[in-house]
Image (tube, rainbow, N blue to C red):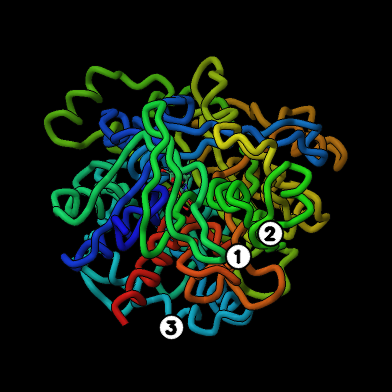
């Protein structure tokens, strides 16, 4: 046996696992990553994120199946393919979700994942710039800071929310999630703090940690029901690495893909794909959940928007002070509200304000200047699946999110878009609002609004749930994240969430890995 632990995927979870498991010098750890090193400077300069979502050198750039609920559109799904994974290309918004999200996980057969049980791991990971408190900690690897620079128009957004009667919230991860405010971000001194910068960089010189990039794990090596290694393609050659335990951190799309490629998954699907069934596990790839989002755009003559930033001046401010617009995560402000459809007090819609025009993930450049409000329902009921298109590991898997399969999700999308439009209609924006771009002024009736959602909604990048944790027949891992019915095999990433949390998913994934890694010491 060459390694004690082989970790597949150096994303948000994989970097945490690599760091924590190699803290013990007697553990030999191998970290495999399909992408390359994170040396693109736009990864580290926060506003550079606009240049990352289309860059297929560092991005899997997946496309979903055509969506029946979205006019048969195939949706663009960026995912990081680089050290740091999606945390190297994400928008850096730091959100943990709601206490009730974790109580819900606990009620789904995972009693030790209630809020009181996960909070210590949010704290263990955190280095909070504002200092420690009951709900925050300092000294952890993940730097959580206030933006060094925020756009003056983000204040207009906050004023507009106040004019609508919403409370101000200066800590969405404090006692209350509800309200509006500036987001805290995973940055250190104006630079992105990805999982790779937070966890991998400090560990990379350890002699017991090997990091192999451009290494695609194609298949698990199994002896009976025991995982013994990984078959990898690296620079056109196949290699086999053997380890005492294999830990899958490939994310919500690739972890179920790798399990299925290895014969672990729904038997009928594996058989039709021509893969020998090693372990019939029905839940693999099922239970896919994501946040669907709708953007409301106004045109504006304000010269403060980020549409036409003076790049020389922004570049110099960044170069000499790690400050100014280039240090912004662009989605600077936001809010959480409880909709009129909610049956309890929990916020069920999240907003992200972008002081620039953002259409189709920034892939469609619109003329002029403007601003965008993203709005997304937080606890969708639609469920999709990841399957294989082929037994060829280099082929993209079949991604079927089934967006808007549930009427509840559609109603909440309408409400989200309605509220976004109300925010832009407030007095606080009147001096800066020339007109609505999306939805167009012609969108008035309910049918027209539905059509607008079906035509324009996009992912806000939070797929989870495809190797869910629990003890029911559809669960893939138990609450120690060990794959049911297998030995020496875990999944540790966004795919284990039994249900999507109410917010952005990076901090929760890092928490999941911190909690799992800690269990290795006991
Ligand atoms: C554009 C974008 C914006 C986002 N914005 C935010 C935000 O502002 N705030 C927030 O909290 N969350 C955000 N998210 C979501 C968040 O970043 C992800 O939920 C989180 O990073 C997922 O972590 P993970 O460990 O599950 O997977 P990932 O971080 O995606 O890591 C998986 C890694 O495994 C590698 N891999 C996969 N398959 C293999 C294989 N077979 N062999 C070897 N390596 C493999 C991948 O290349 C990747 O590096 C965003 C995501 C995206 C894409």
| Residues packed near mark 1 inside 10 Å, few (<14), some (14 to 19) or many (20 plus) | many
Q: Do the residues labelled 1 and 2 touch (CB within 8 Å)?
A: yes
The structure residue drawn at horizontal position 44% and vertical position 54%, both measured from the top left corner, is 249
Do we see residue 375 in this rendering? yes
Q: Do the residues labelled 1 and 3 touch (CB within 8 Å)?
A: no
Cα distance in 3D space between marks 1 and 2: 7 Å
In front here: 162 or 109? Answer: 109
Which residue lies under the disc numbered 3? 116
The structure residue drawn at horizontal position 79% and vertical position 53%, both measured from the top left corner, is 268
Q: Which mark is residue 287?
A: 2
The residue furthest top is 367
Sequence-earlier tag: 3 or 2: 3
Sequence-earlier tag: 1 or 2: 2
In front here: 41 or 407? Answer: 41
Q: Nearer the viewer, mark 3 or mark 2?
A: 2
Q: Which mark is residue 468?
A: 1
Residue 427 x, y percent position in the rendering:
55, 43
Of helix, strand and loop, which one carries label 2? loop
Q: Residue 438 carries which label?
A: none
Of helix, strand and loop, which one carries label 3? helix
Relative to residue 162, is residue 8 drawn left or right?
left
Relative to residue 136, is residue 77 drawn left or right?
right
Residue 271 x, y percent position in the rendering:
76, 48
- Tell me where residue 451 sits by quadrant: top right
Q: Is mark 2 within 8 Å of ligand 1?
A: no
The structure residue drawn at horizontal position 27% and vertical position 54%, both measured from the top left corner, is 145
Q: What is the tally of numbered marks visible in this picture? A: 3
Residue 488 x, y percent position in the rendering:
45, 67
| Residues packed near mark 2 inside 10 Å, few (<14), some (14 to 19) or many (20 plus) | many
Cα distance in 3D space between marks 1 and 3: 20 Å
Q: Do the residues labelled 3 and 2 touch (CB within 8 Å)?
A: no
């Amino acid at each position: 046996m060459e390694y004690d632990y082989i970790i597949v995927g150096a994303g948000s979870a994989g970097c945490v696992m690599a760091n924590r498991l190699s803290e013990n010098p007697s553990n030999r750890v191998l970290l495999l990553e399909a992408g390359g090193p994170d040396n693109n400077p736009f990864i580290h300069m926060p506003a550079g994120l606009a240049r990352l979502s289309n860059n297929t050198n560092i991005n899997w750039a997946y496309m979903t199946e055509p969506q029946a609920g979205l006019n048969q559109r195939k949706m663009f799904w960026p995912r990081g393919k680089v050290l740091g994974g999606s945390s190297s290309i994400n928008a850096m918004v730091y959100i943990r979700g709601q206490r009730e999200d974790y109580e819900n996980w606990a009620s789904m057969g995972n009693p030790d994942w209630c809020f009181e049980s996960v909070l210590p791991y949010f704290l263990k990971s955190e280095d909070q710039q504002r200092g420690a408190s009951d709900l925050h900690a300092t000294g952890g690897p993940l730097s959580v800071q206030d933006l060094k620079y925020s756009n003056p128009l983000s204040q207009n957004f906050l004023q507009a929310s106040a004019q609508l009667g919403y409370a101000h919230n200066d800590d969405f991860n404090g006692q209350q999630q509800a309200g509006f405010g500036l987001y805290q971000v995973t940055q250190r001194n104006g630079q992105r703090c990805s999982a790779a910068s937070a966890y991998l960089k400090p560990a990379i010189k350890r002699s017991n940690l090997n990091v192999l990039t451009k290494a695609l794990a194609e298949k698990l090596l199994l002896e009976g029901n025991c995982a013994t290694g990984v078959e990898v393609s690296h620079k056109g050659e196949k290699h086999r690495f053997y380890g005492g335990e294999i830990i899958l951190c490939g994310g919500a799309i690739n972890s179920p893909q790798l399990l299925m490629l290895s014969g672990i998954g729904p038997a009928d699907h594996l058989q039709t794909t021509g893969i020998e069934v090693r372990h019939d596990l029905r839940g693999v790839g099922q239970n896919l959940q994501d946040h669907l989002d709708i953007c409301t755009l106004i045109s504006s003559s304000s010269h403060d928007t980020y549409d036409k930033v003076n790049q020389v001046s922004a570049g110099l401010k960044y170069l000499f002070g790690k400050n100014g617009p280039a240090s912004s995560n662009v989605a600077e402000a936001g809010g959480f509200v409880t909709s009129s459809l909610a049956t309890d007090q929990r916020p069920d819609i999240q907003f992200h304000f972008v002081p620039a025009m953002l259409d189709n993930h920034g892939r469609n450049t619109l003329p002029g200047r403007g601003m965008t409000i993203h709005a997304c329902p937080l606890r969708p009921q639609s469920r999709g699946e990841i399957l294989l298109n082929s037994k060829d590991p280099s082929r993209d898997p079949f991604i079927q999110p089934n967006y808007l399969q549930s009427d509840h999700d559609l109603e909440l999308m309408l409400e989200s878009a309605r509220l976004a439009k109300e925010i832009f209609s407030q007095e606080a924006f009147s001096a800066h609002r020339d007109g609505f771009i999306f939805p167009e002024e012609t969108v008035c009736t309910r049918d027209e609004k539905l059509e607008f959602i079906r035509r324009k909604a996009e992912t806000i990048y939070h797929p989870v749930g495809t190797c869910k944790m629990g003890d029911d027949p559809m669960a893939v891992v138990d609450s120690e994240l060990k794959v049911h019915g297998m030995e020496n095999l875990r999944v540790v990433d966004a795919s284990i969430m039994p249900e999507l949390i109410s917010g952005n998913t990076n901090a929760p994934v890092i928490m999941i890995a911190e909690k799992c890694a800690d269990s290795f010491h006991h």
